[in-house]
Image: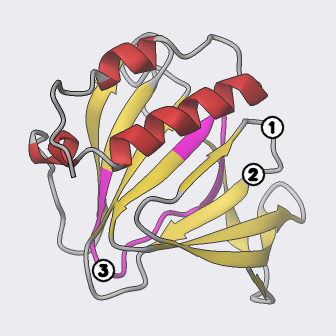
Amino acid sequence: MLARQTPIDHAAALRGLSATQDAAYLAAARRILVDMVGDPDLLAQASIERAARAYTRNVLFGDDRHTVYAIAWAPGSSTSIHDHHCSCCFGMASGALQEDWFEALDGDRARLVRTRTRRPGEVACMLPGGPNLHRMANVSDREAISIHIYGFNARARTTSIHREYAAADQHTLRV
């Protein structure tokens, strides 16, 4: 395997993402994430905070339109069931996460419809307005690290979450 001659400029690639949030945007974000999760220097150079029983968001880059986080997932940690007010793209750098998708039953409750395990190198992208209800969880006994590109400015807004839901039942379809 050949050594990389120059470091990847992820911040420059992020600035190149279009302001629109469409299929071309998702394709570009996917390419950037593939490079990020495949870059061993990215996380080696980052200061990643961790918590014993929770996940931690660590800002890697950001500008007026996008924020990139490295999220460290302790075993047993999970998000709420939620959707996003912005684009949400993520890739697995290490470990594995379970992603559960939901269908909204009303403004407060959602029903689980399918589950998938995300492994290193996998990338997923979604636009706001969905339906994009999901929950991420580390159901393993090892730490997982994912890298996320959100279409919002973290300096102007504290979260990418639009709404949170409660689980209505546990019927699922595995994919």
Instruction: Tell me which numbered mark, 1 or 3, is placed earlier along the sequence.
Output: 3
Instruction: Tell me which numbered mark, 2 or 3, is placed earlier along the sequence.
Output: 3
Instruction: Tell me the amino acid under the disc marked 3.
Output: Pro
- Secondary structure at numbered mark 2: loop
Instruction: Tell me the amino acid under the disc marked 2.
Output: Asn
Q: Which mark is residue 129?
A: 1
Would residue 44 be visible to someone looking at this image? yes
Would residue 86 be visible to someone looking at this image? no
**Left or right relative to 96: residue 44:** left
Count up the numbered dots: 3
Question: Which residue occupies the extreme right position in the image?
Answer: 105
Q: Which residue is identified by label 2?
A: 132
Q: Quadrant of the C terminus?
A: bottom right
Q: Which residue is identified by label 3?
A: 75
Question: Which residue occupies the extreme front position in the image?
Answer: 2
Whether residue 77 is in magenta: the answer is yes
